[in-house]
Amino acid sequence: EMQLLYPTTQEFKVDNQYQVDPVGIQCHRIEGNFLNMLCRKSNYRSLNSCFERAGLQIAEMYLAPVALANSVLSDTEKRTGCALIDFGAGTTTVVVYYKSILRHLSVVPLGGENITHDLESFPMEREEAERLKLKYGSAFTDNDHIDSELSYPINSTRSIESPRFIEIVEARTQEIVNNAINQIPVDFS
């Protein structure tokens, strides 16, 4: 069973014309298009219960991707159209704005943790993989800048060759980027 978490207005069709704000417009027929984000009712109740037990009242809930978009995107970017892709540890979110309206929000179940996990298979410990990823990892390295003689130290006795490390990081990063791009709708009509 689902709970409506975050409804957002797309636009209204007033008679045969689309309007963002139909207040004050006389018409015979009005239709509304909405983007509704849902969550499981059990998750919603659990979240509210946690706050109640902590003695806190919730004034309003915001979705993290929408709050992030509101803090980093300009009005011009939202009006002309843009996609904000947020790479997280476990997920990557895609938020799309067009004509100042939130048109699409999706979550890709891939993130930085997947890169760390791939490096662990080299093999190395999780802490070592995370350290290497943060210190040496890059989404893209030009082939001219790959030093086949270079190795990155895993620990005091082991290392990973730079080309292999770059291959692992870039392959997963490319997969995450491709999945995020595939979430962006092509048409909003």
Image (spheres, helix red, strand yellow):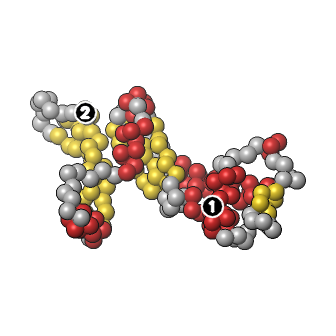
Q: Nearer the viewer, residue 4 or 43?
A: 43
Q: Position of residue 107 (x, y in %)?
A: 45, 56
Q: Residue at x 35, y 34 (%)?
A: 100
Residue 167 relative to residue 52: left or right = right
| SS class, disc 2 | strand
Disc 1 crowd, CA 10 A, few/some/many (<14, 14-19, 20+): some
Which kind of residue does numbered mark 2 sit on? Gln
**Residue 40's quadrant in the figure?**
bottom left
Q: Quadrant of the C terminus?
A: top left
Disc 2 crowd, CA 10 A, few/some/many (<14, 14-19, 20+): some
Q: Residue at x 42, y 46 (%)?
A: 95
Q: CA distance from mark 2 to mark 1?
A: 49 Å
Which kind of residue does numbered mark 1 sit on? Glu
Q: Which residue is mark 2?
A: 19
* Residue 126 seen in render: yes
Residue furthest out toward the right: 149
| SS class, disc 1 | helix
Q: Which residue is mark 1?
A: 130
